[in-house]
Amino acid sequence: MVRAKVEERSAGAVLFYNDGGIRKYLLLKHRRGHWDLPKGNIEAGEEPEYTAKRELIEETGISNFRFYDGFREEIEYYYKRRGGILVHKKVIFYLAEALSNDVRISREHVAYKWVDFEAALKLASFNNTRKLIRLAEEFLSQFK
Ligand code: ATP
């Protein structure tokens, strides 16, 4: 069994924009190179959904969005911090529609892209990110 020294909890969102009838997902390129979804650390006493909304605003500059009730997915992974400390991280993801596509990234990221479903699966760096985008697409298909 893996014994992590540190536990981290973050929350974020699969964010999409309806671009003339084509659903586009937002992926952010992290300073360290990977393409991922907007997310961030849950501060003490914060509700994860509040964190996800706060991080969306901080990391994308978009504050005009609509969260969907009924979508709440948790992923987990391990990574090593510099110095070798093993971290076990759980991240809760919500699903939100952006009502604007005008993105302003923070200093944590170096680029962003709005991409359709197939391109998002190709661009995302991690399997669990791909899984979340698939789940979002499946969830949204009920509204067609
Ligand atoms: P946060 O955005 O939650 O504040 P952070 O930017 O400090 O976090 P992470 O994005 O969790 O940190 O990245 C820490 C390490 O975990 C990086 O080395 C990254 O490669 C890896 N990592 C990030 N996201 C995932 C993921 N979805 N699956 C597996 N490994 C990941």
Image: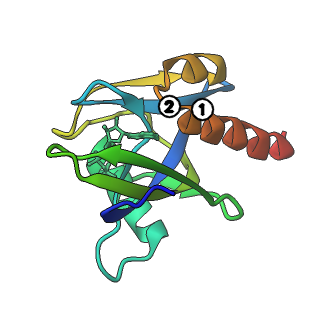
Asked if ligand 1 lies within 8 A of label 2, the reply is yes
Cα separation, mark 2 vs mark 1, equals: 7 Å
Q: Which quadrant contains ligand 1?
A: top left
Task: Give the structural element (helix, strand or loop) at label 2.
Answer: loop
Residue 142 is situated, as x and y percent measured from the top left of the image, at 85, 46
The colour style of the image is rainbow
Q: Label 2: which residue?
A: 126
Location of residue 45 with respect to 124 vertically, above or below: below
Of all residues, the one furthest to the front in this rendering is 1
The picture places residue 2, in percent across and down from the top left corner, at 46, 55
Name the residue that disc number 1 marks. Answer: 130
Q: Is residue 41 above or below residue 110?
A: below
* Residue depicted at x 34% and y 83%: 45
Task: Assess disc 2: are there few (<14), some (14-19) or many (≥20) residues with their C-alpha within 10 Å of its C-alpha.
Answer: few
Local SS, label 1: helix
Percent x, y for residue 29?
Answer: 32, 27
Q: How many marks?
A: 2
The residue positioned farthest toward the bottom in the image shown: 45
Q: Are dots 2 and 1 in contact, CB under 8 Å?
A: yes
What amino acid does circle 1 point to?
Arg
Quadrant that contains the C terminus: top right
Please tell me which residue lies in front, 127 or 138.
127
Q: Residues within 10 Å of mark 1 (few under 14, many from 20)?
A: some
